[in-house]
Image: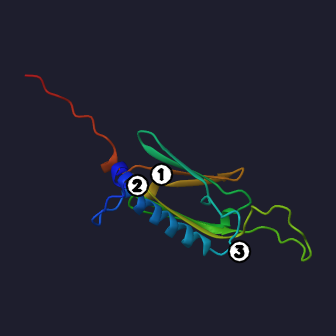
Amino acid sequence: MIIRRYFDAPTWGWKSPFEELARMRRELDRVFEEVPRTWPVELPTGVFPLTNITEDKDNFYLRAELPGTKASDVDISITGNSISISGERKIIAEHKNVKYHRREREAGSFRRMIKLPAQIDTSKVEAKSSDGVLTVILPKAEIAKPKQIPIKVS
């Protein structure tokens, strides 16, 4: 390429790979210039409720943060190896003429569906709420528990 440009030799239709990258960059710049400037600066992130799932030999333990949510506003359903938590988060309404300086807490409905790596015994599931944390104990089904197989020596 250096020789071709130095001597101004014909290219016979060959293009530099960098010319294609430059064309792509121009096209992306054009697309982003058309993006409306009215988009919010901060896009909403995260998932509500925040959830941790742990396990031991016999159970899975689901802990979900639900601050300010009453137990009567939360529904839990379990089928096979998945658990669904849904409900509504209610926040006390402010006055009409209030001016927000920062608004991160939102009210509204939520739903989380989480798949677990093993089957659950749905008849033994327990749930309790304390200090804004929902704890669900999910016993593993007998078929999902590991079995110790003794080896016979002859």
Q: How many residues crowd mark 1 within 10 Å: few (<14), some (14–19), many (20+)? A: many
Q: How many residues crowd mark 2 within 10 Å: few (<14), some (14–19), many (20+)? A: many
CA–CA distance between discs 3 and 1?
Answer: 46 Å
CA–CA distance between discs 1 and 2?
Answer: 6 Å
13, 61: nearer the viewer: 13
Residue holding disc 1: 138
Q: In the image, 41: left or right of 15?
A: right
Residue type (three-letter) at the residue carrying disc 1: Leu
- Which mark is in front, 2 or 3? 3
Q: Earlier in the sequence, mark 3 or mark 1?
A: 3
Where, by quadrant of the figure, is residue 40 drawn? bottom right
Q: Which residue is painted at 67% across and 67% down in the image?
A: 72
Marks 1,2: beta carbons within 8 A: yes
Q: Is residue 6 above or below residue 90?
A: above
Residue holding disc 3: 38
Q: Earlier in the sequence, mark 2 or mark 3?
A: 3
Q: How many residues crowd mark 3 within 10 Å: few (<14), some (14–19), many (20+)? A: few
Residue type (three-letter) at the residue carrying disc 3: Thr
Q: Which mark is on residue 120?
A: 2
- Which mark is in front, 3 or 1? 3
